[in-house]
Image (cartoon, coloured by chain):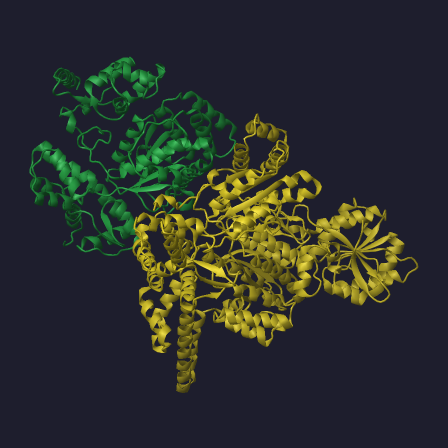
Chain colours: A green, B yellow
Amino acid sequence: LFETLKVLQQEVTTMHSKPNKPSSVRLSDEGRKIADQKRREKGFNRQDVRWYTKAHTTVPTLKRFWAYNIRLDNFEALCEVIGVDWQTVVDWSSIIDLPLDILNPIDPLELESNFYINRPQEDECYKLIKSESIKSQLESNFHINSSQENECDKSIKDQSILIRIKAPQKMGKTSFLTRVLSCADKSSYLNCRLDFSSIQIDVRSNLRSLLFWFCTEVTNEIGIAIEPLEEYWSKKISSQLGAELDWCTDYFERYLLHSLKSPLVLGLDEVDSIFPQNENDEKANEVAANFMTMLRSWYQWGQEEENWRKLIVLISHSKKDYPNLNVNNSPFNVGHAIELKPFSQIQIAELVKRYQLNFSSEEIQHLFNYFGGQPYLSHRAIYEIKAKKVSLVQMLQEAPTEGGLFGDLLRSLLSTLDEHDTLKSEFIKVLQTSLAIQIESKEAFQLYSMGLVKYLGNDILLSGEIYRQYFCNRFRIES
Amino acid sequence: MNQNYYSIGGCLGPDAQTYVKRQADDEFYNYLKSGEYCYVLNSRQMGKSSLLIRTKNQLKQNGFLCVDVDISAIGTMVTSEQWYFSIAKNIVRRLKLPNFDLDTWWSDLSRVESGPSVYSSQHLLSQFFEKVVLDLTQQPIIIFFDEIDSTLSLNFKVYDFFGLLRHCYNQRAEHPKYNRLTFALLGVTTPSDLIQDKCLPPLNVGREIRLTGFQIEEAKPLLPGLSTEEHTARVLLRQVLIWTGGQPFLTQKVCKLIASTQTEVSQGDEESWVKYLIEKEIIEKWRVNDEPIHLRTIDERLAAKEKDRVYLLGLYQEILQKGSIEFDGSLDEHIRLRLSGLVIEEKGKLKVYNPIYKKVFSLNWVKDELLKLRPPSYIEVIEAWESTKDKSYLLRNKELQKVWEWAAGKNLTKIDYDFLSASQQAENQKARSRSKQIRNIGFASLNIALMILAGFFLGRLSEKEALVKRNISFGDKILDKKLENTNNLEGAEAFKEKKYKKAISNFERSLKSQPNDPETRIYRNNAKFSNGKSYTIAVSVPLGTDRKTSLETLRGVAQAQNEVNDRGGIKGIPLKVLIANDSFDDASQQNFAVEIAEEFVKKSEILGVIGNSDSDATLRTAKFFKTKNLISISPTSTSTSLTNFSPYFFRTVPNDNVAAEKLANYVKSKAWSKPAVVYNSGNSYSNSFMKSFVKSLQNQVPQQCRFDLNKNEFDAAEIVKKMRDDCNAQAIMFVPNSVRELNNMLQIAQAASSSVKKLPLLGGDVMYSPKILEVGGKTTDGMVLALAWDIDTYPQSSFVKESRKLWRADVNWVTAMAYDAAQALIKAIRIQKIPTRQGMPQALLNQNSIALGASGLPISFSLSGDRIDPPIQLVQIQCQTSSCDFKPLKP
């Protein structure tokens, strides 16, 4: 094994020397811990300006450093600044030698990528964030041209800002959220994205650990010292005074917001993944509901307290119904909702063009119908066609199979359906017709949030042909 | 036009232009300004939070300190200690007191406070109000508790919290600084849900603020966003209000919708334009377009209690069909329907709030929803039957059986019940006519047929079981034959047929002529709530052998049931009482009380039992309940053998030791040496009472002063002679085993009083009987008894007042102790999140929450099953010229 590694290492080094074909690598899990330890010793936060300037790179790169592939030269430089040998922290299996531009096209942080398709809802977000800066009287160079701006500012002046990005799975929520955050970044906003789907189960099933995780992540992300938090938290634990939600709120108010000079845009990605898979898991449900209640109360604080208006919360979620949550104590019925729609045929055509593929309009139409314009599926398919140099027909033939490109995704949908009998039987009704039909509303919402169906009025319709092919085969029904 | 002019969901800021000022604004502001407690309890999205922000702002400008605490933000995963602290913390955060550190203050104080008392957090909060909130500020302060209904999701009870708010109010009389402190409560709930403890009613000192929909003249702030043309805007607004009925959320939403279309409507088209928009954007795709969630919340609230959904839908259907129905505030379902926001109460009637709801939640919608809930075989026939009343649609045999099974435990609509009972009746008739035919065939086959029928109707009951069934009742029969009259018999008949309305009116008629009949009162209470979920307790009384005590016991239970159900039940759920007769004047049925007990155990809905009456029966049933984990509370069994008898047995009456000790102390205080004791060693009560009495007197009762009626031939004169000569007694203590022995006792008293020096008399509680006054007359004048309770000691108590009103007569200690037993059970049910039999003993012993008894003192039990600080007092027979009476003996 060691030999193989050596060879790999050699190869990497050679690749590195060729500027036209740079390799990209990322941190191993162990390496991430080492890097985190080392940067603390240096007194850096995770996006420290001193760090990336010394390494002659930029914030986005440093941000990506923690979770994604970055160019090997940047990787080496960043490691060097914190005094770590890059070879001890690299994930050797991550080495990719594809041209960087089409490297991992779904990478949400690939914002400067030529392949990012603009979503019309972005402007709406910027406008909302912008109005925030005016009312909190903070300097901002964030600017969006809009004739209605002034009117708009006036009417929402007194409100705190909470933006909900809701869309089914694989609809590009993460990319969207990250894009918005990074734009805010450019214009002297502090920003921070937390991915709730990555929280470990033992953290999210305990309110105290969830809150501590939350505080820690935000503190680290925005780059202020972590020690006061640790001290504060252990004091709270030993005194046991007050509710745990209050500890968190209090920390945000007194330690974070109070000292902030510019507004903080907090992006909470897939926030609803803290709800347990099993609806009957009461404890986990209560933890999630309590957390949501806290977010709601922050929104309310912002209505009246200047300090809290420095906080702009963006949340992305895919479900529409939270059976175990009192919606009136949750953030899901306040603020501004932004719904992400699938790509239109025009956007698909645009994407095809950017990959320099030559599709006929029939082919585009076919591609669109097949995936229902779902951003992840469509983009991934186009990328595959380009990278593997296969034809559209070939790709579509393999797509709905277990071994195909979307095997994992389809299997996970299948297992969810298999676990819920009613959901499955209602979905079969949808499969059996090409018309829009009415089914039980609870199941309809669930299928929608899974991305399997779309709405037409109160009726629903299968969202893409790929699902018909795969599931009809699996359930052995005639399509 | 600008759609951002309007804002929906959450709340409007203090300066929002689209804020619509209503009558409630002025009320709320003015009451708070004058220092009155207020509560705003209403359905969702009626503008509660916006009202709060507005009012607060206004009050601030007038020099008030305003603090609002969002109770829901504290979360539900807290201990009560953390919760109380968080309340204080949130207040401090808003008050922004300079140089004040709550953490230190609170920890210091809690260290000073004595021990881990259960009241300490509440006490600390009370100190906090006084020493921090009031002492560190000068201005008047108003504290708003928002989302108060989230206290219902906590896993502990917060009665103490509400009690504390009340306490602050009461302090105003003595400490004027409390006049500066005013509270307001806001939430989506009913007052009765919130404060189920009748003893802590903070809300009855407050004002209720009712939020109504927008009126056209109030809604002017909404005009500017609608159109640039003032006239058009006006017409549009009028149309909007017609559609929304002024419902605040919907009104703002439709206005925003109109503004967002960026279309200038020409004159004359306003009506159709609004209609078009509402139908297209709100009604047509209501499930999808419901953003922020509004309509779906209404739908969910109707389904909140799954098993009531059919009933609520039926009720709503009736409103849709009839236009409105009479509002009955005592019905939980009416309140819940109103709280959902779907209907409003207007001039005593419930009607659908607005045309939008009518279209979304239409008759078709109701039908579809019912379709999902009713079994498929049943849907078509019930509809056909409803429109034709044709008997051929009625259900038969197995189908009927199946539907009954489905209906079990559910709360259905009136039509369901009408249909089912009509089916059942037809089925019974058929069975009867079948039996008639059979009778003609011959005697032998008749017997067989009757056996089959008996098996069919009674489920093959054995004789024993049949006897048990005949002696228990929820209201389908009258157990006490002496109370029977045409009205309550008809009521029972109607009850059996589940015609509860009829049953109620019959029972009430009976109560008019017989107001002190507790049995009928309990049945009337049961009938009133028989359509929904209820909590059930049972009461077991010896109607066959001691009717007087039985009725007295039932009165106490009936009174407690009356009170709790009048206040909306236990957490909104009414209390049902099953009555059982557990004794006959027949030696072969000695064990009948245990058979009744077995029946109670089988009926799984019974959470606890009140009974039995005498100690011997109680010992037998308590032994049985112990193995079945069902609790019983006896109101009258005083035997000391029951102390520490079973973890499932409790009693409200003090045990004999307590009474004996009280009397012994009285003897000591009078310095009467050597009292003579008359008792019966053959009876456990008499024997144990005597022993405790003697023991309490440090055995200063020598053998020659003890007179055992069990040993000697009874001769009153001889006994009195011995008392004087051998014992040299200075007082006589009577401990008869039962009322039957009273005569002997009276003879002794008579003989004693006719001698030169009249000896003071004392007696056990058996002597407490009208008979002794009647028969004994002046011979018993001055006799002192120890009792659990006496009416003249608490003439002003609410229990006494209520009992006089209810029974038109005075009640005695038995009724008071039975009332206490029922109160204890009610409390134990209430403090459990989901009441279960298993949870009852723990809940009864839980002292964080207390029930107050007839004497106004807390009812709490020790692990032995006896009461902690049992009520006991002395009464004396006092005779005026012609009559004698029991009077409390002043110490």
Q: Within the image, what quadrant is residue A30 found in?
A: top left
The residue shown at (32%, 30%) is A193
Viewer-nearest residue: B140 or B266: B266
Name the outermost residue toward the bottom: B440
Residue B315 drawn at (x, y percent): 43, 64
The residue shown at (33%, 73%) is B384
Assign the N terminus of chain A to one quadrant of the image: top left
Residue B469 drawn at (x, y percent): 52, 67
Q: Is residue A204 left or right of residue B518?
A: left
Residue B545 drawn at (x, y percent): 65, 66
Q: Within the image, what quadrant is residue A298 found in?
A: top left
- Against B71, is B451 above or below? below
Q: Is residue B800 left or right of residue B397?
A: right
Is residue B106 shown to the viewer in this render?
A: yes
Viewer-nearest residue: B531 or A393: A393
Is residue B840 shown to the viewer in this render?
A: no
Viewer-nearest residue: A388 or B37: B37
Name the outermost residue toward the right: B756
- Against A165, is A76 above or below? above
Residue B499 drawn at (x, y percent): 48, 71
- Against A141, is B327 above or below? below
The residue shown at (85%, 53%) is B731
The residue shown at (26%, 47%) is A448
Q: Is residue A9 left or right of residue B157?
A: left
How many numbered circles does the render carry?
0
